[in-house]
Amino acid sequence: MQDSSIAFLKRLLDTPGPSGFETAPARVWRAEAEAFAHRVDVDVAGNSIATVGDGAPRVMLAGHIDEIGVMVTHVDEEGFLYVDGIGGWDPEVLVGQRLRILTRKGEVPGVVGKKPIHLMKAEEKEKAVKMTELWVDTGARDRAQATEWGIRVGDPAVVDQPLVVLGNGLIASRSVDNRVGAFVVLEALRRLAEGAPPAAEVSAVATTQEEIGYHGGGARVSAFKLDPQVALVVDVTFATDAPGVDKKQVGEHRVGSGPVLTRGSAIHPLVFERLADTAHAEGIPFTIQASPRFTSTDADAIYLSGHGVATGIISIPNRYMHSPNEIVSLDDLDATVRLIAAFCRGLDSSTDFVPR
């Protein structure tokens, strides 16, 4: 992976954008896309779309650009803020974290507080903390000052954890899930743009609101707009090389073992087989994950869009999902980029995904 792409990844991961408030990272994504894509667009749901080629079939590459965060639900008279989760949180990991509160007047720093352990009763120490037992301290002396700083009910916030580079090509970031998916689909489009134009029309989409998209989020809107014949969704999945993870439940997917291809009831079998064949041909290692029902990804919205879309899922093994320090491998990101680019180059107007 080139240094320029790694620099883009850092900008993308460090820019705050929880579900419903993805404008800032989406701008970063579109600015990068404008350097090589044939067309770049944004829709009313905030989905960013970059396209290369104008042939057939129409291909949609989707990676959601939102991240989990919190939202201000109340400001008390003393100026302390109370919050609820945007997306799924384990409140324990929020204790003591610093936040970036995104207000109409700019970012306001804050610290998540809770009762000190010294003041807890014995039975309190044995219980998991609840979101309602936490508060955010911005240093405001009262509600009036918090308001003066621009803080309002409904303001989103993210954990203040910039990307950090670890050993052996690993990175940690609060927004790996799933801004790395938005990164991967755009990098795959970049590779398609660098060579001869693909026979297919390929659109990379940075989708919005996946973490709260119980009815399809931005992926439903963008799939309707693009009307693709085939779609690849890039997301993250649970890495099983950390202590305490049950491989019998989620399979065996180590960080650094390559992309994870999903097989399941919502996954088009011809897309899966074509991805697997492409990976073998390109010498790209991969593992397989079973998904017997819904996938809990953008694929659930895409595959039933319009007349139906032949949809596959490629996932990145991710340690510590939905925490301030999710870990993935740069090698896995690069391998997934190569797999998607090769898959797209193998498509042309004669490609048929109708199972017969």
Image: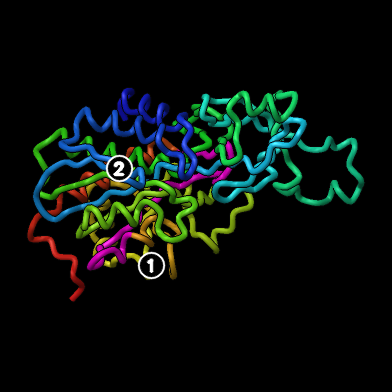
Which quarter of the figure has residue 134? top right
Q: Which residue is denoted by mark 1 in the rendering? A: 264
Give the residue type at disc 2.
Val
Q: Bin the neighbour count of mark 1 within 10 Å (Cα to Cα): few under 14, some 14-19, many 20 and up.
A: some
Q: Is residue 309 magenta?
A: yes
> Which residue is drawn at the image coordinates 26% and 47% (left, top)?
340
Residue 287 placed where, x, y %? 39, 55
Please state which amino acid type lies under the numbered disc 1.
Answer: Gly
Q: Which residue is mark 2?
A: 185
Of the image marks 2 and 1, the number of the one nearer the N terminus? 2
Q: Residue at x 44, y 31 (%)?
A: 169
Find residue 194 and report its image quarter. Answer: top left
Q: For the residues labelled 2 and 1, say whether their Cβ atoms are less than 8 Å apart.
A: no
Quarter of the image that includes the N terminus? top left
Above or below — where is 37 with respect to 130? above
Instruction: Judge from the rendering whether residue 153 lies leftward or rightward of residue 77; answer left or right.
Output: left
Q: Nearer the viewer, mark 2 or mark 1?
A: 2
Which span is picked out in magenta? 302-328
Name the mark on residue 43: none
Q: Is residue 316 inside the magenta stretch?
A: yes
Q: In the structure shown, which secondary structural element does the residue marked by tag 2 occupy?
A: helix
Q: CA distance from mark 2 to mark 1?
A: 22 Å
Q: Nearer the viewer, residue 85 or 241?
A: 85
Taking depth in this image into account, of 204 and 263 the one nearest to the observer is 204
Residue 4 percent location from the top left of the image? 31, 23
Q: Quadrant of the C terminus?
A: bottom left
